[in-house]
Amino acid sequence: MSGEVRGLTVIFTGNGKGKTSAALGVVLRALGHGFRCKVIQFIKGEMDSGELHLAGKFGGEFEIAQSGRGFTWLKDHTVEEHKAAAQDGLRMASTDMLSENYRVLVLDEILYALTKELVTLKQLYELIGKKPPSTHLILTGRAAPSELIEKADMVTSMESIKHPFKSGIPAQKGLDF
């Protein structure tokens, strides 16, 4: 398959599970083609997850940065600390994107950070506007606003039909984190 090489803006959103998993699937596919990839996690900071262990196995081809301070509802950090961390993550994303060192840049849970007003829609518009033509930018999280959906090239909404959490089954290592 040949054609124009064009970096896309992709959104994985919705109330179902799988947004981060879908983004990591894109990363895995891109790594298979020899592309450098980076994931910046905006909410899952300080959380041990399988993808953190995986990143080290790809040398410098796959990086993960945790810019969040953890889930905001846990109250382990103040709103100001969460906002400062999200703003740091956004600055990192801008720098990384403009460096053109990464073919895939994932802003994991950035839409949650937007919903919680840790970042602004204007900041996301500016970031999308700076995206180099060769970079795929992936935004994940619930409640993607319609204005952002219009700016994206591809949007997938995850729908929850059945989830084990509703049956009292906790998140499972290797599947959920």
Image: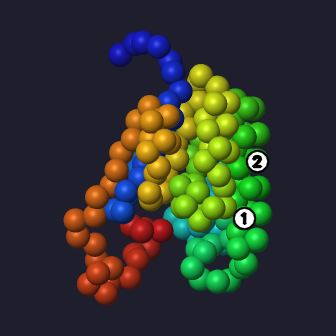
Snapshot quadrant of residue 85: bottom right
Nearest-to-viewer mark from 1 and 2: 1
Q: Where residue 95 appears, x then y in whole percent? A: 76, 39
Question: Vertical placement of 170 versus 146: above or below?
Answer: below
In depth, the one of 127 and 60 nearer the eye is 127
165 with respect to 125 (left or right): left
Work out how far the residue at label 1 is from the one at label 2, CA to CA, in angstroms. 12 Å
Residue drawn at point x = 42 percent, y = 12 percent: 3
- Residue 34 in view in this figure: no
Mark 2, residues whose alpha carbon is within 10 Å: few (<14), some, or many (≥20)? some
Q: What's the residue type where badge 2 is placed? A: Arg
Q: Residue furthest top?
A: 3
Q: Which mark is residue 83?
A: 1
Q: Where residue 167 appears, x then y in whole percent? A: 26, 84
Snapshot quadrant of residue 19: bottom left
Q: Residue furthest left?
A: 161
Q: What's the residue type where badge 1 is placed? A: Lys
Please name the residue that numbered disc 2 is placed on. 91
Secondary structure under tag 2 reads helix
Snapshot quadrant of residue 38: top right
Mark 1, residues whose alpha carbon is within 10 Å: few (<14), some, or many (≥20)? some
Residue drawn at point x = 37 percent, y = 57 percent: 14
Question: Vertical placement of 129 versus 51: above or below?
Answer: above
Residue drawn at point x = 50 percent, y = 30 percent: 8
- Residue 113 in view in this figure: yes
